[in-house]
Image (spheres, grey):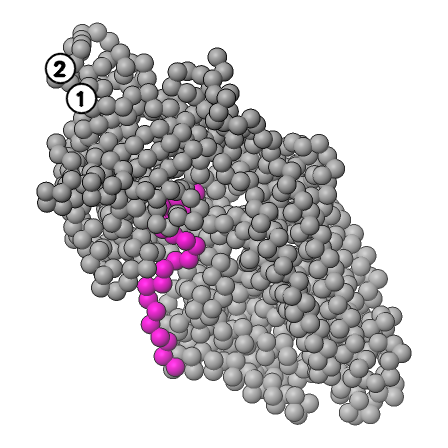
Amino acid sequence: MGTGEAGAGESPAAAEGEPSLRVEDLAYAYPDGTQALFGVNLTIARGERVALLGPNGAGKTTLVMHLNGILMPGHGSVTVAGLPVREDTLQEVRRRVGLVFQDPDDQLFMPTVREDVAFGPANMGVRGEELDRRVRRALERVGMLDAIDRPPHHLSFGQRRRVAVATVLAMEPEILVLDEPSSNLDPASRRELAEILRGLDVTVLMVTHDLPYALELCERSLILSGGVIVADGPTREILADAELLAAHRLELPFGFAVPGSTSLPDLHAM
Amino acid sequence: MGAGHHHTLHRPGDTPVHRLPPQCKLAAVAAFAIVVVATPRTAVWAFAAYAALLAAVAAIARIPPGFVLRRMAIEIPFVLFAFALPVIGLGERVEVAGLSLSVEGLWAAWNILAKATLGVVASILLAATTEPRLILVGARRLRLPPLLVQIAMFMLRYLDVILDEMRRMRVARESRGFVARDLRAAPVLARSAGALFIRSYERGERVHLAMLSRGYTGSMPVLDDRPVPAAAWAAALSLPAAAAVAAALAWTLG
Amino acid sequence: MHVPDGFFTAAVSVSAGVVAAAGMAYCLRGARRELDDRAAPMAGLVAAFIFAAQMLNFPVAAGTSGHLLGGALAAVLVGPYTAVLAVAVVLIVQAFLFADGGLTALGINITLMAIVTAVVGWAVFRLVVRALPRGRPAITAASFVAALVSVPASALVFTLLFWIGGTAPIEVGTVALAMGGVHLLIGIGEGLITALTVSAVLAVRPDLVYGARGLTAPLELRNPDGTTRLAEPSAPAAAPAAASARKGGFAPFALAGLAASLVLAGVVSFYASGDPDGLERVAADHGLDAGEQEHGLGDSPLADYGVAGVADERLSVGLSGIIGVGVTVAAGGALFYAVRRRTRDEVGASGTRTGSADGPDRARA
């Protein structure tokens, strides 16, 4: 599985000179006082596809909301392609970080697909023919161009999920951050989405419980548990380490085995 | 017509009035109200003329009289107050049907009733012929402060959410035998008010976060800025203009 | 109670309109600083909440009912500037779409129900909070008192405006009594609803209560080796710089607004006085003023729109308009000023600072 190349023969990291995302010592507490993140550190290079794994309540969604400034850290910093996330840089940060939430219905709030996909670039000042071109191109990349004038609530869940991705792609982001992209998708939609993601040339950070999906699409994985990163390495290795997974309430699906794992699944045990 | 809207104020239709751009209608109604209020109360014929003008608009917009009358119920508290004025008012008194009524009070009651009623009917006609979303568009085109228009937009969105939740909570309360009868009901109502606020906030928050993530800065991007034809303005402003003629006559002729 | 068209004279309506517009303009700037990009949705939520709540009448006693005004509640939840805007939007929408409140009485309605309640509510809230020990119970108690006081305050201003320029011939004493009595009772209901709502929101989402900022604890950081340290908050809680910038900008703005209101009131009140009171003109024209009766507001020093003792009619009428506006603006301005100073002082006293996060005390085994 390849990392997306920025240009023919050119190393993407060298071209940019900056990682797509750098998070340093990030700490945060919820409004009612409960602390969620206790000092998160991670770096993602341009073109990588990385999975963010972890048990429920680990703070994955909370962490993700810091990446485009929806939440501001109580301590620490987030930097996107060299640009620190601050009150005064939010507009550009939100162009660079394309955040796709778990529930597509939270993201599709306009009367037609066209208007939803146009919303992002329009906020950035794009108008007229250029706007139209971007909308069409984004929908093409997710295979939903023929739905352009339909109301979103007439589409199937999987289609809405794809349109939600398009709404963010139209802004031409630096890094695409997806929260549980495969949840509630039927197998065919799951596969279609995987093909789409593989074909994109942006950096990808994917929050997911779907370990096989992570293995299929992301060459590197992080585990967030107890508000800090406890593992960071090739997906294959992490998923093959049954003890590590068990320590953080992660499990492979029944019957699934990673080639080269330290233990074979016992199909007869509970 | 609008998904999930409880607004029974809007009566969908395709009449010339419905088709007028919203900013023209807003300006027309506001101007009309000012003209009405500035008219001396003694020129009773002028008020009759205003009523006739509004009736004409209602006819063009195919709004049935019953529709308007039902929504005028909002005026009732002040109607009652207005009727009380001749009785409790001071000054010179006159005998009417056996009752001693204050002359000044009668005029004051007439003043309030006439002007308030005309204002109410104009507003009802505006709301009946214009979708709420379009009214906000009209407000923005009239160069009202964008923050205010945005607040109004969010208010309309949240209103649906809140009224929905309120209904559910009331059903739940009443199913358990609780009906608000006097001041002692306040604590129960207020506790559910807090929960209502939070639940509505959280439902709206997710959509708002999604909007923020796509660069929303507080005003919806205007994609459709077609200039409004002068004919539309002329049509809309014909209402206050005609009223102004009547008012001018009322002033000069006494 | 939403005032309809025709209830107040043109002079008072227009002056109140100017006050309302000036107040809202000032609040538009302040609201951005209060809540930045959350201002619009939070204000919209509060507005929707108040709108819905105002549709519910709560029984006050013996067949009378009142409804929530909401200015104080809004001020505690989203801050005074945003609160004024939220309630103003409710009133504007009610006037245009729901025919609740006259279009020409918007200035009066906004002044009474948005500006007076929110400003008085916030001022009282801050006073009470400072007098009590820090914590959630103090905020709840302060909300109750603030809401309770805001309602009769609004009624008081209504009575004042009515005394100056109401078109109905009722004894001011009667009005004052009726308004005062009912609104005291409504104030109790308002206080209860406000306090309970604020306490319920405080318990679950204290970040949604503007009046409760500064009650947060320092963050803990976990090092890779399992040890912990405390963090110094990196984002400043409020912006004292913004407050002082505001001070510079307010004075000339306020003076201009005041001057405009006074000129308008003075000029308009002269020309308007002869007009809406058609009865008087008719009487004068037809020589009936020989037996002219006392105007209903005869005991007011501003009776007949003239100030007693000033001979020249134009000057007299103009003066009364100016005095009327002056009183309202002075009261509003004083309240705003008081609120601004307190808010600025509170900013300095927020939160405790813990030891430095990096450096010597990294590891606490």
Residue occupying image coordinates x 65% and y 47%: C344
The answer to whether residue B92 is left or right of residue A89 is right
> Can you give x and y, in whole percent of width and height, for residue A103 in the image?
32, 39
Indicate left or right for C47 with C173 as reference: left
> In this view, which residue lies farthest toward the top?
A269
Look at label 2 and name its amino acid: Gly
**Near-viewer residue (C216 or B118):** C216
Q: Secondary structure at mark 1?
A: helix
Badge 2 density bin: few <14, some 14–19, many ≥20, Cα 10 Å: few
The tag earlier along the polypeptide, 1 or 2, is: 1
Residue A184 appears in view = no
Question: Which residue of the protein is positioned furthest toward the left in this rendering?
Answer: A9
- Disc number at residue A74? none
Tally of numbered tags: 2
Q: Which residue is mark 1?
A: A236
Residue type marked 1: Arg
Which residue appears farthest toward the front when viewing the image? C360
Where residue A16 appears, x then y in whole percent? 23, 43
In front of the other: B169 or A65 = A65
Reply above or below: C273 against A115. below
Region of the chain picked out in magenta, as a range: B205-230
Query: Would residue C337 be seen by someone viewing this image from the given angle?
Result: yes
Question: Is disc 1 surrounded by few (<14), some (14 to 19) or many (20+) residues within 10 Å?
Answer: some
Circles 1 and 2: CB atoms closer than 8 Å: yes
Which residue lies under the disc numbered 2? A260
Q: Quadrant of residue C322?
A: bottom right
